[in-house]
Amino acid sequence: MCPEPAGAAALAVVLDQLETLSRFDRPDTATQAEQAAEAARGLGDATLELRARLVQADLARRRGDVAGAGRTAQEVQRWATEHGARHLLSRSHFLLAAVLQELGDLSLALEHAVLAVELLDPDGPPAQRIDHLARLADCLGLQGDRGAGERYAEVLLLAEELGDVDRQLLVLNNHAYVETVAGRYDSALALSTRLQALAAAHGVPLHVGRLDTIARALIGLGRLAEAEAALAPGAAREALDASPDGDAGADFLLTLAEVQRRRGSLARARQTLEECVRRCDRHGLTSIRVRARREQAELHAAAGDFRAAFTEHKTYCQEALDLQSAQRDARARALQAMHETTEARRQTRRYRELSLRDPLTGLYNRRHVDDEFPRLLERAAGEGVGVAVALLDLDHFKQVNDRWSHDVGDQVLRAVAALLEATASAAGVAHPGTFAARMGGEEFLLVLVGGDLAGAVRRLEGLRQAVSAHPWGELADGLAVTVSIGVTGAVGRPASTPAELLSRADEHLYGAKTGGRDRVVSDLG
């Protein structure tokens, strides 16, 4: 039946409002979206009903149902394509950009964000255009595109012209956050200062997520006292419980504990961290709980209990690897749930591969080693092919992080990984199966298939020299990096287990460390 024009027009206005409200925490938005969907069904207007469903899906995404939101967005997109519904297409791309951003596929998220802007009616609600442009800026910024700054400035100007304080705060916060991720702390602080001034001028309290962004900029600049002062308003239980990020303030508490520890307030830092852990356990916040272990290790070290610090750090490294694998599997399952086509199966295979990769370096991770190494040894033993196993550990790597920053440390890890990958690729041309992996922290594994142990040692000596000779000074003045390597082989031996080979390689690595570092120690001596 045909909808009544007046009813449909009034409902369209309501949906315009709901689409712009769904970016913010309003307690009645979900109820209003359900009522709008029912009203649209009563009118027999599929377009309006699907608009309401997209609002509901976006709210579900923010509550954690990312795959469900993605399925709804795709269903709406198919219908909108068949029926030429341009606004629905724009809104479905807008939601898919957010879904894929959360699933870690930033390049595909960017494609959807671009289409969401291109398809949006220029005469539509100005707040909606701000939202679409802001999501595009977020996708660009998170990919490291320096052009994101211009996008954020454009969106902020639109929000100022509209007099929309909520969106001005959102844009300033997101831009500042992206700048902290990129390590541009001066820029992040300038944006954070504007954020604070705007909030104060309009009497808007900053929630803990935005206070955390401000503090991160100050921490990056070494202004710890100011960072702790910036965090102070969010430390109250009511503020933590009201966190809009779904983490009950646990992430905020982790930042506060770090600042307190770095300022020497160890007792306060311990109390803050304990509360962070309690909230993680209560709400099942596995990712933050893993990061809390790293902070706990730092606390033990600051208190002089280095044995406890080492034990906690080992636990952190293993749990971090396990979490990465679990997250990658979860993303793969979410994508599989979203897609039912050949393209979907291709994406699932891609995410299965990603689950076996270390996100920082791109090398294989411990999960790949656990899966593939035993099979590789079985094949090699059956074919009578030798296998050399090398464990590599960067020397004094903690000093790199402490003196030159974790960002420089990450660049070092990526550069060493590239040298390892090149070595593995060169060796793997003649002997397939060779691979490099990151075992955790600054420790790497290289498995060389074929050839003899002496040849493997020569390759690793070349790798050691390449690390030492790398122009590290381009990253930071005075930076030098070396690597210690322990090598063993199953050449001419009965079939060995992964544990046996890794244990022998680890013994040789220990010998390289105690023998002065920056050297290769193997079964050959």
Image (cartoon, rainbow, N blue to C red):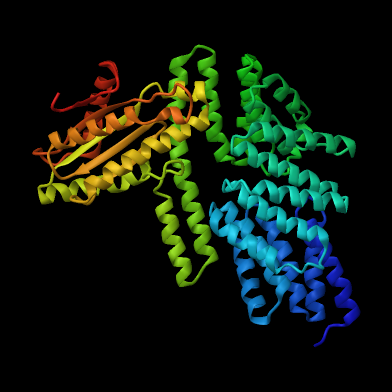
Position of residue 299 relative to residue 115, above or below, is: above
Position of residue 39 relative to residue 518, above or below, is: below
Q: In the rendering, at what x and y percent does residue 25 appear? A: 78, 50
Residue at horizontal 47%, vertical 47%?
A: 326
Residue at horizontal 40%, vertical 23%?
A: 480
Query: Image quarter for residue 128?
Result: bottom right
As drawn, is 138 to the left or to the right of 234? left
Q: In the rendering, at what x and y percent does residue 266 appear? A: 61, 15
Q: In the rendering, at what x and y percent does residue 254 appear? A: 62, 30
Residue at horizontal 47%, vertical 69%?
A: 343
Query: Image quarter for residue 207?
Result: top right
Judged from this view, the residue extending furthest toward the top is 304
**Observer-nearest residue: 21 or 494?**
21
Q: What count of labels does the image hold?
A: 0
Quadrant where the C terminus sits is top left
Residue 494 appearing in the image: yes
As drawn, is 463 to the left or to the right of 345? left
Position of residue 264 relative to residue 482, above or below, is: above
Residue 212 appearing in the image: no
**Observer-nearest residue: 281 or 269?**
269
Quadrant where the N terminus sits is bottom right
As drawn, is 342 to the left or to the right of 4? left
Residue at horizontal 24%, vertical 28%?
A: 486
Q: In the rendering, at what x and y percent does residue 199 appear? A: 84, 38
